[in-house]
Image: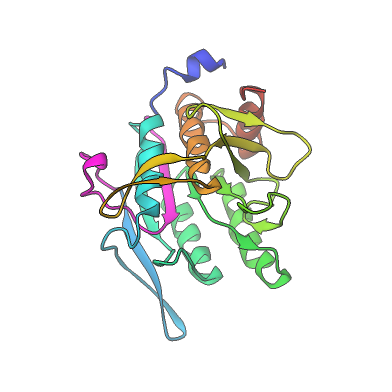
């Protein structure tokens, strides 16, 4: 597989679950997009409730969908709303959404968020990242914007493709060995669709979907790749 071959791919046949704040398919930037799933996950007392989503509660997930779609226009996207208007969530909500996406046959989970590395959060994240690994479901995650060496989940599991931001070409990625956050992609001053229009944003949240888009292109050409096989090929084809 060469980078030149990868550039011809459109992501056809690949299903991507966006675990985020929802996706606003009525935004002009996403004209023609039909979501495979459009679900919201909320706490209702001691229980979790799964409902049809009412779009994006802030704009974050819409931006993620747009970045992925630009790189992998023929990939199928599904929205699993787990973040609220303050971009916060609960571990149990993310766990349930991730497991449902895996069960529904999504090939990639885009997780443009991270949970701090407190011990009590590790095992719930490990439960579904292990399930993803065994199901050959690939996970792409963001890291801390303040300190990429800060432990966050799911990004610090070695089966996850974890991405930090950089100021670089917006359709490329870099591999940096010797770090749990192995990849870098453009996430600095990115103009994206947002609630009510457009917004210029900076963060690893917006670098991760670039890697997701390229991974979708790769899986479209090589659907047989295991999680570790795909991660290794992404290392080999990175800019440096």
Q: Which residues are magenta?
A: 12-35
Does 74 sit above or below residue 20? above
- Is residue 16 highlighted in magenta? yes
Query: In the rendered image, which quarter is residue 42 located in?
Result: bottom left
Q: Nearer the viewer, residue 45 or 198?
A: 198
| In this rendering, position of residue 40 left or right of residue 133 | left
Q: Nearer the viewer, residue 103 or 162?
A: 162
Could one spot residue 72 in this view of the protein?
no
- Is residue 46 highlighted in magenta? no
Q: Nearer the viewer, residue 162 or 75?
A: 162
Where in the figure is residue 9, as x and y percent of width and height? 42, 22
Which of the image's four quarters has the C terminus? Answer: top right
Q: Main secondary structure of the magenta part?
A: loop
Residue located at (51% from left, 26% from top): 169
Residue located at (71% from left, 56% from top): 150
What colouring does the structure picture have? rainbow
Which of the image's four quarters has the N terminus? Answer: top right
Where in the figure is residue 35, as x and y percent of width and height? 29, 48
Could one spot residue 159 in this view of the protein?
yes
Task: Name the residue at the bottom extreme.
Answer: 45
């Amino acid at each position: 597989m060469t980078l030149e071959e990868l550039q011809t791919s459109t992501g056809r046949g690949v299903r991507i679950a966006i675990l985020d704040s929802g996706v606003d398919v009525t935004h002009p930037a996403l004209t023609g997009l039909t979501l495979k799933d459009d679900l919201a996950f909320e706490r209702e007392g001691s229980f979790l409730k799964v409902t049809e989503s009412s779009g994006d509660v802030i704009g974050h997930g819409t931006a993620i969908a747009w970045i992925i779609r630009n790189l992998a226009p023929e990939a199928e996207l599904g929205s699993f709303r787990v973040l609220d208007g303050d971009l916060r969530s609960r571990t149990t909500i993310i766990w349930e959404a991730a497991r449902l996406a895996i069960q529904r046959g999504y090939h990639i989970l885009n997780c443009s968020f991270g949970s701090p590395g407190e011990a009590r959060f590790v095992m719930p994240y490990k439960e579904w990242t292990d399930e993803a690994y065994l199901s050959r479901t690939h996970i792409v995650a963001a890291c801390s914007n303040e300190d990429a060496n800060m432990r966050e989940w799911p990004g610090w599991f070695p089966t996850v493709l974890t991405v930090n931001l950089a100021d670089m070409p917006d359709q490329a990625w870099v591999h940096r060995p010797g770090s749990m956050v192995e990849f870098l992609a453009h996430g600095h001053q990115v103009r994206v669709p947002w609630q009510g229009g457009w917004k210029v944003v900076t963060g690893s949240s917006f670098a991760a979907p670039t890697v997701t888009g390229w991974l979708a292109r790769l899986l479209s050409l090589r659907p047989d790749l295991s999680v570790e096989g795909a991660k290794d090929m992404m290392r080999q084809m990175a800019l440096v």
